Amino acid sequence: MPEEVFAAEELAYKQQENIVFSEVHGFGLLMDVFTPTGTSNGLAIVDVACGAFHSDRGKINDHKKAGMFDTFCGKGYTVFAVRPGSISKFSAPEMIANLNQGVSWVIEHAEKYQIDADRMGLMGASAGGYLACLDAVTAEAGSPAAKFKAVGVFFPPTDLLNYGPVQLKVRTDPFLGKTVRRLLFPEGFGDLDDKALDERVAKFSPARRVTSSAPPFLFIHGDADPLVPLQQSEVMVEALKAANVSAELIVKPGGAHPWPTIAEEVAIMADWFDKTLDAEIGGGQ
Protein backbone atom coordinates (compact mmCIF):
# COMPACT_ATOMS: atom_id res chain seq x y z
CA MET A 1 0.00 0.00 0.00
CA PRO A 2 1.21 3.57 -0.58
CA GLU A 3 3.38 4.87 2.22
CA GLU A 4 1.25 7.98 2.72
CA VAL A 5 -1.69 5.84 3.86
CA PHE A 6 0.22 5.17 7.06
CA ALA A 7 1.49 8.70 7.55
CA ALA A 8 -0.30 10.56 10.32
CA GLU A 9 -1.48 14.03 9.51
CA GLU A 10 1.01 16.52 10.90
CA LEU A 11 -0.28 18.42 13.90
CA ALA A 12 -0.14 22.20 14.14
CA TYR A 13 1.75 21.91 17.40
CA LYS A 14 4.37 20.10 19.41
CA GLN A 15 3.31 19.29 22.95
CA GLN A 16 5.49 19.27 26.05
CA GLU A 17 3.65 17.54 28.89
CA ASN A 18 3.80 17.97 32.66
CA ILE A 19 6.24 20.84 33.00
CA VAL A 20 6.54 21.66 36.70
CA PHE A 21 6.19 25.43 37.02
CA SER A 22 6.00 25.64 40.80
CA GLU A 23 5.60 23.61 43.97
CA VAL A 24 3.04 24.08 46.75
CA HIS A 25 3.10 22.03 49.96
CA GLY A 26 5.18 19.41 48.20
CA PHE A 27 2.80 19.19 45.23
CA GLY A 28 4.19 19.97 41.79
CA LEU A 29 2.03 22.35 39.75
CA LEU A 30 1.95 21.40 36.09
CA MET A 31 1.44 22.87 32.66
CA ASP A 32 1.66 21.64 29.08
CA VAL A 33 3.22 23.83 26.42
CA PHE A 34 2.01 23.73 22.82
CA THR A 35 4.42 25.31 20.33
CA PRO A 36 3.49 25.86 16.69
CA THR A 37 5.09 23.59 14.10
CA GLY A 38 4.67 26.36 11.55
CA THR A 39 5.74 29.99 11.76
CA SER A 40 5.39 31.55 15.21
CA ASN A 41 3.63 34.89 15.53
CA GLY A 42 5.64 35.67 18.67
CA LEU A 43 2.55 35.76 20.89
CA ALA A 44 1.39 33.61 23.79
CA ILE A 45 -1.96 32.43 25.10
CA VAL A 46 -2.27 31.18 28.67
CA ASP A 47 -5.06 28.60 28.72
CA VAL A 48 -6.48 27.94 32.19
CA ALA A 49 -7.04 24.18 32.05
CA CYS A 50 -9.73 23.77 34.66
CA GLY A 51 -13.29 22.45 34.57
CA ALA A 52 -15.69 21.99 37.49
CA PHE A 53 -12.74 23.33 39.49
CA HIS A 54 -10.64 20.27 38.70
CA SER A 55 -7.36 20.41 36.78
CA ASP A 56 -6.71 16.80 35.84
CA ARG A 57 -5.27 15.89 32.45
CA GLY A 58 -8.76 15.31 31.16
CA LYS A 59 -9.28 19.07 31.03
CA ILE A 60 -6.36 19.48 28.64
CA ASN A 61 -7.76 16.63 26.57
CA ASP A 62 -11.14 18.41 26.50
CA HIS A 63 -9.48 21.54 25.15
CA LYS A 64 -7.62 19.44 22.62
CA LYS A 65 -10.89 17.90 21.41
CA ALA A 66 -12.38 21.38 21.08
CA GLY A 67 -9.57 22.27 18.67
CA MET A 68 -8.01 24.93 20.86
CA PHE A 69 -4.40 23.93 20.36
CA ASP A 70 -4.77 23.09 16.68
CA THR A 71 -6.47 26.41 16.03
CA PHE A 72 -4.24 28.70 18.05
CA CYS A 73 -0.95 27.01 17.19
CA GLY A 74 -2.07 26.93 13.57
CA LYS A 75 -2.16 30.71 13.76
CA GLY A 76 1.33 30.85 15.26
CA TYR A 77 0.51 31.20 18.95
CA THR A 78 2.38 29.37 21.67
CA VAL A 79 -0.18 28.06 24.18
CA PHE A 80 0.65 27.47 27.82
CA ALA A 81 -2.03 25.22 29.32
CA VAL A 82 -1.72 25.96 33.02
CA ARG A 83 -3.34 23.59 35.53
CA PRO A 84 -4.05 25.71 38.63
CA GLY A 85 -5.03 22.83 40.90
CA SER A 86 -8.26 21.12 41.92
CA ILE A 87 -10.90 21.94 44.50
CA SER A 88 -9.98 18.77 46.39
CA LYS A 89 -6.70 20.43 47.41
CA PHE A 90 -6.99 24.17 46.74
CA SER A 91 -9.36 27.05 47.45
CA ALA A 92 -10.19 29.73 44.87
CA PRO A 93 -7.60 32.20 46.25
CA GLU A 94 -4.99 29.45 46.12
CA MET A 95 -5.95 28.54 42.54
CA ILE A 96 -5.51 32.18 41.53
CA ALA A 97 -2.10 32.23 43.23
CA ASN A 98 -1.16 29.00 41.46
CA LEU A 99 -2.29 30.43 38.12
CA ASN A 100 -0.14 33.48 38.65
CA GLN A 101 2.84 31.26 39.47
CA GLY A 102 2.28 29.72 36.06
CA VAL A 103 2.07 33.14 34.42
CA SER A 104 5.32 34.14 36.14
CA TRP A 105 6.95 31.00 34.73
CA VAL A 106 5.79 31.94 31.24
CA ILE A 107 7.20 35.44 31.63
CA GLU A 108 10.52 34.08 32.91
CA HIS A 109 10.76 31.73 29.91
CA ALA A 110 9.62 34.23 27.28
CA GLU A 111 13.01 34.32 25.58
CA LYS A 112 13.19 30.54 25.36
CA TYR A 113 9.81 30.34 23.66
CA GLN A 114 10.33 33.58 21.69
CA ILE A 115 7.11 35.21 22.82
CA ASP A 116 6.23 38.78 23.79
CA ALA A 117 5.59 38.62 27.53
CA ASP A 118 4.12 42.13 27.54
CA ARG A 119 1.31 41.25 25.13
CA MET A 120 -0.24 37.95 26.17
CA GLY A 121 -3.74 36.57 25.90
CA LEU A 122 -5.67 34.68 28.59
CA MET A 123 -8.25 32.00 27.82
CA GLY A 124 -10.47 29.60 29.76
CA ALA A 125 -13.77 27.77 29.78
CA SER A 126 -16.29 27.21 32.57
CA ALA A 127 -14.34 27.12 35.86
CA GLY A 128 -11.19 28.00 33.91
CA GLY A 129 -13.09 30.95 32.48
CA TYR A 130 -14.05 32.02 35.99
CA LEU A 131 -10.41 31.95 37.12
CA ALA A 132 -9.32 33.81 33.98
CA CYS A 133 -11.92 36.52 34.54
CA LEU A 134 -11.08 36.93 38.22
CA ASP A 135 -7.34 37.02 37.58
CA ALA A 136 -7.66 39.62 34.85
CA VAL A 137 -9.98 42.04 36.65
CA THR A 138 -8.09 41.91 39.96
CA ALA A 139 -4.59 42.25 38.48
CA GLU A 140 -2.52 44.94 40.13
CA ALA A 141 -0.07 47.09 38.21
CA GLY A 142 3.21 45.24 37.81
CA SER A 143 1.72 41.84 38.65
CA PRO A 144 2.03 38.86 36.28
CA ALA A 145 -1.65 39.07 35.31
CA ALA A 146 -1.21 42.71 34.26
CA LYS A 147 0.60 41.34 31.19
CA PHE A 148 -2.68 40.10 29.72
CA LYS A 149 -3.95 42.39 26.99
CA ALA A 150 -6.95 40.29 25.95
CA VAL A 151 -9.17 37.70 27.64
CA GLY A 152 -11.38 35.21 25.82
CA VAL A 153 -13.67 32.89 27.81
CA PHE A 154 -16.39 30.33 27.25
CA PHE A 155 -19.44 30.13 29.57
CA PRO A 156 -17.81 31.34 32.82
CA PRO A 157 -19.47 31.82 36.21
CA THR A 158 -18.93 35.49 37.07
CA ASP A 159 -21.40 36.46 39.81
CA LEU A 160 -21.65 33.88 42.59
CA LEU A 161 -24.24 35.89 44.51
CA ASN A 162 -26.72 36.32 41.68
CA TYR A 163 -26.57 33.11 39.70
CA GLY A 164 -29.25 33.29 37.04
CA PRO A 165 -32.59 32.74 38.74
CA VAL A 166 -30.86 31.73 41.98
CA GLN A 167 -30.07 34.18 44.77
CA LEU A 168 -27.32 32.15 46.39
CA LYS A 169 -27.61 31.19 50.03
CA VAL A 170 -24.06 30.13 50.83
CA ARG A 171 -24.89 28.40 54.09
CA THR A 172 -27.69 26.18 52.80
CA ASP A 173 -27.68 25.85 49.00
CA PRO A 174 -27.02 22.15 48.24
CA PHE A 175 -25.56 22.58 44.76
CA LEU A 176 -23.76 25.81 43.83
CA GLY A 177 -23.52 26.70 47.51
CA LYS A 178 -21.60 23.52 48.21
CA THR A 179 -19.04 24.42 45.54
CA VAL A 180 -18.74 27.98 46.83
CA ARG A 181 -18.27 26.72 50.38
CA ARG A 182 -15.41 24.51 49.24
CA LEU A 183 -13.86 27.29 47.15
CA LEU A 184 -14.13 30.18 49.59
CA PHE A 185 -14.75 28.69 53.04
CA PRO A 186 -12.75 25.44 53.15
CA GLU A 187 -12.30 25.77 56.92
CA GLY A 188 -15.93 26.63 57.61
CA PHE A 189 -17.73 29.89 58.33
CA GLY A 190 -16.40 30.47 61.84
CA ASP A 191 -18.22 33.41 63.40
CA LEU A 192 -18.94 35.19 60.09
CA ASP A 193 -22.44 36.62 59.82
CA ASP A 194 -24.48 36.60 56.59
CA LYS A 195 -23.25 40.06 55.56
CA ALA A 196 -19.61 39.01 55.92
CA LEU A 197 -20.29 35.83 53.94
CA ASP A 198 -21.84 37.79 51.09
CA GLU A 199 -18.95 40.25 51.11
CA ARG A 200 -16.45 37.42 50.68
CA VAL A 201 -18.47 35.83 47.89
CA ALA A 202 -18.71 39.22 46.16
CA LYS A 203 -14.93 39.63 46.48
CA PHE A 204 -14.48 36.46 44.44
CA SER A 205 -17.16 37.26 41.86
CA PRO A 206 -15.40 38.69 38.78
CA ALA A 207 -18.43 40.69 37.60
CA ARG A 208 -18.36 42.58 40.89
CA ARG A 209 -14.62 43.36 40.70
CA VAL A 210 -14.45 45.09 37.33
CA THR A 211 -12.47 48.32 37.01
CA SER A 212 -11.56 50.51 34.07
CA SER A 213 -8.07 48.96 33.97
CA ALA A 214 -9.39 45.58 32.82
CA PRO A 215 -8.26 44.34 29.38
CA PRO A 216 -10.68 43.70 26.49
CA PHE A 217 -12.90 40.64 26.86
CA LEU A 218 -14.73 38.23 24.56
CA PHE A 219 -17.40 35.92 25.97
CA ILE A 220 -18.94 33.01 24.08
CA HIS A 221 -21.91 31.36 25.76
CA GLY A 222 -24.76 29.09 24.75
CA ASP A 223 -28.34 30.12 25.44
CA ALA A 224 -29.27 26.58 26.50
CA ASP A 225 -26.46 26.11 29.04
CA PRO A 226 -27.78 23.87 31.84
CA LEU A 227 -24.86 24.53 34.19
CA VAL A 228 -23.84 28.18 33.85
CA PRO A 229 -26.69 30.54 32.90
CA LEU A 230 -26.11 32.88 29.96
CA GLN A 231 -26.87 35.65 32.45
CA GLN A 232 -23.41 35.07 33.94
CA SER A 233 -21.70 36.33 30.80
CA GLU A 234 -24.29 39.04 30.27
CA VAL A 235 -23.83 40.56 33.71
CA MET A 236 -20.06 40.75 33.35
CA VAL A 237 -20.26 42.27 29.89
CA GLU A 238 -22.58 44.89 31.33
CA ALA A 239 -20.12 45.62 34.15
CA LEU A 240 -17.18 45.89 31.75
CA LYS A 241 -19.02 48.24 29.43
CA ALA A 242 -20.10 50.38 32.39
CA ALA A 243 -16.38 50.72 33.21
CA ASN A 244 -15.61 51.69 29.58
CA VAL A 245 -13.82 48.41 28.89
CA SER A 246 -14.22 46.73 25.52
CA ALA A 247 -16.41 43.63 25.91
CA GLU A 248 -18.19 41.42 23.38
CA LEU A 249 -20.63 38.57 23.86
CA ILE A 250 -21.38 35.95 21.22
CA VAL A 251 -24.44 33.85 22.01
CA LYS A 252 -24.55 30.34 20.58
CA PRO A 253 -28.20 29.46 19.80
CA GLY A 254 -29.03 26.15 21.43
CA GLY A 255 -25.52 25.90 22.88
CA ALA A 256 -25.17 23.80 26.03
CA HIS A 257 -22.02 23.28 28.12
CA PRO A 258 -20.29 22.90 25.70
CA TRP A 259 -21.76 22.03 22.28
CA PRO A 260 -20.62 19.62 19.54
CA THR A 261 -19.44 22.26 17.08
CA ILE A 262 -17.56 24.44 19.56
CA ALA A 263 -14.43 24.27 17.40
CA GLU A 264 -16.15 26.80 15.12
CA GLU A 265 -16.39 29.27 18.00
CA VAL A 266 -12.80 28.51 19.03
CA ALA A 267 -11.78 29.72 15.56
CA ILE A 268 -13.85 32.88 16.05
CA MET A 269 -12.12 33.49 19.37
CA ALA A 270 -8.69 32.97 17.78
CA ASP A 271 -9.54 35.58 15.12
CA TRP A 272 -10.59 37.95 17.90
CA PHE A 273 -7.24 37.47 19.65
CA ASP A 274 -5.49 38.22 16.33
CA LYS A 275 -7.32 41.52 16.10
CA THR A 276 -7.08 42.47 19.75
CA LEU A 277 -3.41 41.55 20.21
CA ASP A 278 -2.54 42.93 16.79
CA ALA A 279 -0.94 39.62 15.87
CA GLU A 280 -0.15 40.53 12.27
CA ILE A 281 2.08 43.41 13.35
CA GLY A 282 3.55 41.62 16.34
CA GLY A 283 4.27 38.30 14.69
CA GLY A 284 7.47 36.67 13.60
CA GLN A 285 9.74 37.23 16.55
Image (cartoon, helix red, strand yellow):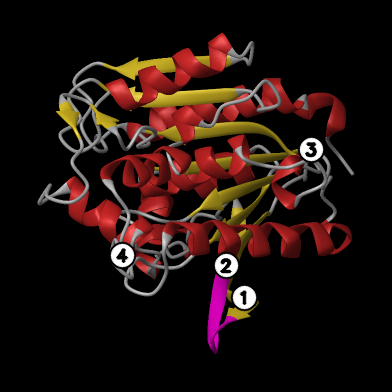
| Numbered range of the magenta stretch | 24-31
> What is the residue that sits farthest to the bottom in this orientation?
26
- Label 2 sits on a secondary structure element that is strand
Q: Which residue is mark 1?
A: 19
Q: Contact, CB < 8 Å: mark 2 with mark 1? A: yes
Real-space CA distance between mark 2 and mark 3, rounded to the nearest whole angstrom? 20 Å
Real-space CA distance between mark 4 and mark 1, rounded to the nearest whole angstrom? 38 Å
- Label 3 sits on a secondary structure element that is loop
Q: Is residue 280 above or below residue 23?
A: above
Q: Indicate the position of residue 282 as horizontal and vertical percent values.
A: 85, 32
Q: Residue at x 32, y 54 (%)?
A: 192
Of the numbered discs 2 and 3, the one sitting upstream in the chain is 2
Q: Is residue 8 left or right of residue 140?
A: left
Q: Which residue is mark 2?
A: 31
Question: Which quadrant is the N terminus positioned in?
Answer: bottom left
Q: Indicate the position of residue 155 as horizontal and vertical percent values.
A: 35, 33
Q: Indicate the position of residue 193 as horizontal and vertical percent values.
A: 29, 49
Regarding residue 67, the answer to whether it shows in the image is no
Q: Is 26 a magenta residue?
A: yes
Occupied quadrant, residue 202: top left
Q: Is 176 a magenta residue?
A: no
Q: What amino acid is found at the position of numbered circle 3 in the picture?
A: Arg
Q: Contact, CB < 8 Å: mark 4 with mark 1? A: no
Real-space CA distance between mark 3 and mark 4, rounded to the nearest whole angstrom? 42 Å
Of the numbered discs 4 and 1, the one sitting upstream in the chain is 1
Q: Residue at x 52, y 41 (%)?
A: 134
- Label 1 sits on a secondary structure element that is strand
